[in-house]
Image: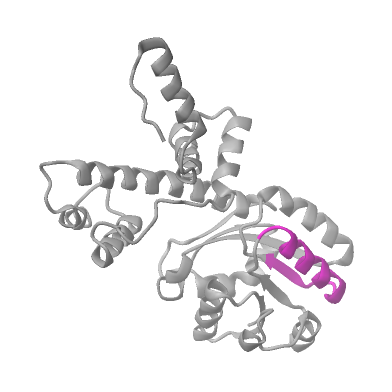
Amino acid sequence: MQLGLIGLGRMGGNMRDRIRAAGHEVVGYDHHPENSDVANLAELVEKLAAPRVIWTMVPAGKITEDTINELADLLSEGDIIIDGGNSKFTDDAPRAERLKPKGVHYLDVGVSGGIWGKTNGYALMVGGDEADVQRCQPIFDALKPEGEFGFAHAGTHGAGHYAKMIHNGIEYGMMQAYGEGYEILMASELVHNVPAVIKSWREGSVVKSWLLDLLDRALDADPELAQIKGYVEDTGEGRWTVDEAVRLAVPAHVLAASIFTRFESRQDDSPAMKAVAALRNQFGGHAVKSV
């Protein structure tokens, strides 16, 4: 099967290698010429036999919208565009509707696996019409891990990105729990070898996971994480997950706390905590620390 792949950064390049290793032809385009097989999107479309399948793997937002709009003017009836980036799920149904008059089909795919997907495979969550999913199944089979797990046709347009959004919200909560547990262990006067404790959890423990394995790997390189600043960004999905929890009136205490903690990590001196310190001083005479 032929595939056009747009966006050949670290993750996109690894996906290209995995698809090619499965015996499929991939024509790739990237704005960095040294990574690209073609000079522009028009040449990419020209090199693929119709009906075409083109997968975009570029940052969510304007870049994705511009790429899909440009492709829409180049593609023919029966072609399929796949957005495998972290777009917000609310973008997907409108895109599918915009493409429909041109006869161009659309799938949204949530992709998890990061830089390890090339060897371990990617977890794929797909939104769109069943016939389009079936047509692209050879590509999905090449990307997913071996065995029965790692792939789901989640539902209609938007369902793939929605499922990935919830996946990432859960990931935020899991990482926060591991981080807090690590800090308590480090603060304890009893535990003298925190990395060894983390290693002991990797097998036979109910908290074992791939994330735990990665924490162990990080501690192997830097047992006290002394070279890392405790500043954590977010890429949007955690916020969107909490937005959905509010919309659906679903209690999501852990997920909400994890995203707010990330915000807190970016403040050198929290104005809110300054106010709390001032209040304690005012009502109880409690000492404050001066700058």
On-image quarter of the C terminus: top left
Q: Quadrant of the N terminus?
A: bottom right
- Asked if residue 258 lies left or right of residue 5, the reply is left
Near-viewer residue (199 or 25): 199
**Is 198 situated above or below 146?**
above
Residue 275 place in picture, x, y as percent: 48, 24
Left/right of residue 212 with respect to residue 123 in the rendered view:
left
Compared to residue 153, the image places residue 259 above or below, namely above
Question: What residue appears at the point 54 percent right and 87 percent down from the top-left corner?
Answer: 23
Q: Is residue 161 left or right of residue 150?
A: right
Residue farthest top in this picture: 283
Q: Which residues are magenta?
A: 60-82
x, y percent for residue 290? 39, 31
| Rendering coords of residue 256 (x, y %) | 49, 36
Magenta stretch containing residue 149, yes or no? no
What residue do we see at 65% from left, 67% from top?
A: 58
